[in-house]
């Protein structure tokens, strides 16, 4: 045992000695390694000192300060660009890129420029009932585009004959006319009512016996079975209850000359789906469009100074009050009040979003909206508490809770 242990000790001592000798014997052989420059795509190495034998690198020529040599970042290509194929209005072009340093080539697709059209010019004037056409031409490639011009519509003279095409407008037979006296005491024109007419599609001609048809008589077509009526530019006034209870009437489209629509004029016209109002309208009664339960669209001539049709709503411009809504209304952020009965009994409306600008919701405003399942207020529950609500504002509406999205 003693001998063996001595032998181990000797062997370990010899190994230690050898190792010590090896370390002492390697002397770095330092030489300068010149810079390897980077290329366009690959890194290079800065000039440095290194040992020829073990490869260790140094920042000094005596090999005393080991350090990694500095890596030199690649250049980017230095391309010159040559347009091989020019882009056209509808066709892509091509450019060739060549690197001045390494000769690498790349292609670049040049997007089509698109046409540059001049202004529209009328190439064919519209007729009374036939569309016209206008066209414009691309200044680059001469490509032409055309679009139709809407028919101009007839312009009737006092005999109800068009001054351009001589087409004659025949009013529905049997209508009754009552004289209207002007401020000067003279006969100014006529008001019209159903008389003995049995027509269901009523045509109200612009003139009667050479004078303008200015008004629809008070209660003139009330509770009749008409399905449609057409009126022309001379009409200024739709009297009280004029079309009240016309439950088969499908559409209301008033010509631009109409200034006033009396109380109850279209009260309870339950089949009306679209309402179009003209540029001169300035007065509407509070019950003029009451209970239009099928109403799906509202449009107002954009030049109307008193009312706007923004968001498919009928809005009084001066006050921001929403007078009437339809199933497709989007209440604008500027509305201050939803007026009494604005959506009353509308059976088509499914969702309503009330902006924070609204401070009052009127009497019966959403009452009877039996499909209105989503009712959202764009504010907090606290702010909603502050909104004034008229009596029965939501009776029989389909929604249960108000959703707050403030
Ligand atoms: Zn070395
Ligand atoms: Zn290159
Ligand atoms: Zn072009
Ligand atoms: Zn004509």
Image: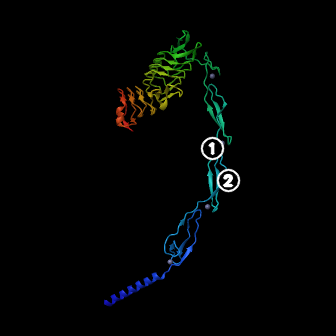
Q: For the view shown, which residue lies furthest in the top direction?
A: 185
* 194 over 253 or under it: above or below: above
Q: Is residue 307 visible?
A: yes
Quadrant hosting residue 115: top right
Instruction: Note whether ligand 3 is within 8 Å of mark 1.
Output: yes
* 308 over 136 or under it: above or below: above
Instruction: Note whether ligand 2 is within 8 Å of mark 2.
Output: no
**Foreground: 51 or 95?**
51
Helix, strand or loop at label 1? It is loop
* Contact check, label 1 and label 2, Cβ < 8 Å: no
In which quadrant is the N terminus drawn? bottom left
**Foreground: 59 or 348?**
59
Q: CA distance from mark 1 to mark 2?
A: 19 Å
User: Which numbered dot is residue 114?
Assistant: 1
Residue at image coords 33%, 87%: 5
Task: Indicate the position of residue 274 as horizontal and vertical percent values.
Answer: 49, 27
**Foreground: 236 or 209?**
236
Q: Is residue 401 visible?
A: no
Task: Indicate the position of residue 36 as horizontal and vertical percent values.
Answer: 58, 69
Quadrant hosting residue 129: top right
Residue density around tag 1, few if under 14, some if 14–19, many if 20 or more, within 10 Å: some
Q: For the view shown, which residue lies furthest in the right direction?
A: 142
Q: How is the image coloured?
A: rainbow
Task: Indicate the position of residue 279 as horizontal and vertical percent values.
Answer: 53, 24
Residue density around tag 2, few if under 14, some if 14–19, many if 20 or more, within 10 Å: few
Task: Indicate the position of residue 233 as horizontal and vertical percent values.
Answer: 56, 20
Q: For the view shown, which residue lies furthest in the left direction?
A: 1
* 36 over 362 or under it: above or below: below
Earlier in the chain: of badge 1 and badge 2, it is 2
Q: Which residue is mark 2?
A: 84
Taking the image as shown, residue 140 lies to the left or right of residue 254, namely right
Taking the image as shown, residue 223 lies to the left or right of residue 209, namely left
């Amino acid at each position: 045992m003693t001998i063996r242990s001595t032998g181990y000790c000797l062997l370990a001592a010899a190994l230690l000695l050898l190792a010590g000798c090896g370390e002492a014997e390697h002397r770095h052989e330092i030489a300068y390694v010149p810079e390897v420059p980077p290329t366009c795509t690959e890194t290079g190495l800065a000039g440095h000192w290194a040992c020829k034998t073990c490869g260790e690198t140094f920042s000094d020529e005596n090999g005393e300060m080991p350090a990694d040599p500095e890596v030199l970042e690649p250049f980017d290509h230095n391309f010159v660009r040559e347009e091989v194929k020019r882009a056209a209005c509808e066709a892509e072009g091509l450019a060739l890129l060549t690197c001045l340093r390494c000769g690498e080539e790349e292609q670049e697709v040049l997007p089509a420029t698109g046409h540059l059209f001049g202004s529209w010019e009328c190439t064919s004037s519209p007729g009374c009932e036939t569309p016209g056409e206008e066209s414009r031409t691309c200044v680059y490639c001469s490509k032409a585009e055309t679009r139709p011009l809407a028919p101009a519509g007839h312009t009737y003279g006092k005999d109800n004959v068009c001054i351009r095409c001589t087409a004659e407008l025949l009013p529905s037979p049997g209508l009754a006319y009552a004289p209207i006296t002007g401020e000067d005491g003279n006969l100014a024109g006529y008001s019209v009512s159903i008389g003995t007419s049995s027509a269901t599609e009523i045509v109200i001609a612009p003139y009667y016996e050479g004078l303008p048809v200015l008004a629809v008589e008070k209660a003139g077509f009330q509770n009749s079975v008409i399905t449609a009526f057409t009126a022309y530019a001379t009409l200024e006034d739709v009297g009280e209850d004029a079309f009240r209870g016309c439950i088969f009437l499908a559409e209301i489209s008033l010509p631009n000359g109409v200034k006033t629509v009396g109380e109850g004029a279209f009260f309870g016209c339950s089949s009306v789906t679209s309402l179009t109002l003209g540029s001169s309208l300035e007065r509407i009664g509070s019950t003029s469009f009451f209970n239009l339960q099928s109403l799906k669209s509202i449009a107002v001539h954009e030049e109307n100074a008193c009312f706007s049709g923004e968001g498919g709503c009928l809005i009084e411009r001066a006050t921001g009050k929403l007078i009437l809504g339809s199933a497709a209304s989007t209440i604008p952020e500027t509305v201050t009040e939803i007026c009494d009965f604005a959506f009353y009994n509308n059976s088509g409306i499914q969702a309503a979003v009330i902006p924070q600008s609204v401070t009052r919701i009127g009497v019966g405003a959403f009452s009877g909206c039996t499909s209105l399942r989503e009712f959202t207020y764009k504010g907090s529950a606290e702010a909603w508490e502050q909104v004034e609500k008229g009596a029965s504002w939501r009776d029989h509406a389909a929604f249960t809770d108000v959703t707050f999205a403030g």
